[in-house]
Amino acid sequence: MDQPLKNKFDSIIFDLDGTLWDSTQNVVYAWQAAINEVDFLDVVMTQEKVRSITGLAYNVIFDMLFPELDPIQRNKVMELCAKHEMSFLHKNGGILYPNLENTLIYLVQKYRLFIVSNCQNGYIELFLEFSKFGKYFIGHQCYGTKGLPKADNIKDIVIDYNLQAPVYIGDTLGDYNSAAKAGVPFIFANYGFGIVESGQIANISSLTELCELL
């Protein structure tokens, strides 16, 4: 266990997918339904594929998944996937990581809590509604709001809420790089979808470790 970092921060900014919950299996169902609606794509979506691109900006995801499509086709698939994803997750949600609420209850007594994700607009709100954890978070920002990269969205949260000593918690190398560009220290959630070998100030293998660390 890394040495505690208590009293060094005034706020915590969380990534969402792979850090607070795992919605990938239900995203697979939603995206497959969308793909089945078009006649120019014959692909079987899998959880492995979804996890491999989780954390990337929403438009970049579809550039990587379907490079063979022309821009018009790719945009159509992206729009259908976004629509089905929101509809399916509203009904079925995702899997909250163990002890999430107990961890938030502890952290919110000491820190201001935020979420920054590369997701589409409305996705964070969906998570907060499904989990009923909106009361723990002061604000959030995502790619879908302004079409900006995660580093810029982290900076927006820092500036908008006048954060003096924030820390970012995420599960991918993209999360680390975004936090670094924003000038925010990074804690790596190694139970998520990615690998970060260096640069982080701490590693956690479960959310409850944050109660000891922070």
Image (cartoon, rainbow, N blue to C red):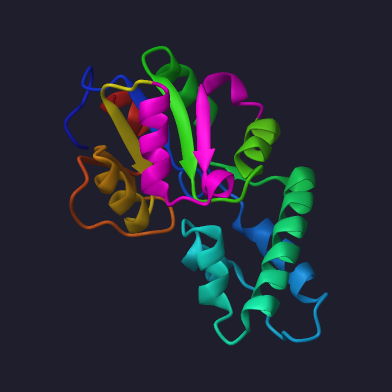
Q: What residue lies at 72% left-to-right and 84% top-to-bottom?
A: 41
Q: Quadrant of residue 12?
A: top left
Q: Quadrant of residue 77?
A: bottom right
Residue 111: % across, % down: 37, 18
Residue in the foreground of this view, choosing between 203 and 80: 80
Asked whether, in this view, residue 179 is left or right of residue 140, the answer is left
Q: Quadrant of residue 95?
A: top right
Residue 212: % across, % down: 29, 25
Is residue 60 shown in magenta?
no
Is residue 144 shown in magenta?
yes
Residue 99 visible in the snapshot? no
Residue 81: % across, % down: 71, 64
Q: Quadrant of the N terminus?
A: top left
Residue 14 visible in the snapshot? yes
Task: Give the magenta-colored segment's residue range.
Answer: 132-161
Q: What residue lies at 26% left-to-right and 37% top-to-bottom?
A: 184
Asked whether, in this view, residue 39 is left or right of residue 197, the answer is right
Residue in the foreground of this view, choosing between 182 and 208: 182
Residue 87: % across, % down: 79, 51
The chief SS type of the magenta part is: helix
Q: In the displayed structure, would residue 166 be above or below residue 24? A: above
Q: In the displayed structure, would residue 63 be above or below residue 143? A: below
Q: Quadrant of the C terminus?
A: top left
Q: In the displayed structure, would residue 115 be above or below residue 94? A: above
Number of numbered tags placed on the structure image:
0
Q: What residue lies at 63% left-to-right and 84% top-to-bottom?
A: 69
Residue in the foreground of this view, choosing between 12 and 62: 62
Q: What residue lies at 68% left-to-right and 77% top-to-bottom?
A: 72
Residue in the foreground of this view, choosing between 105 and 125: 125
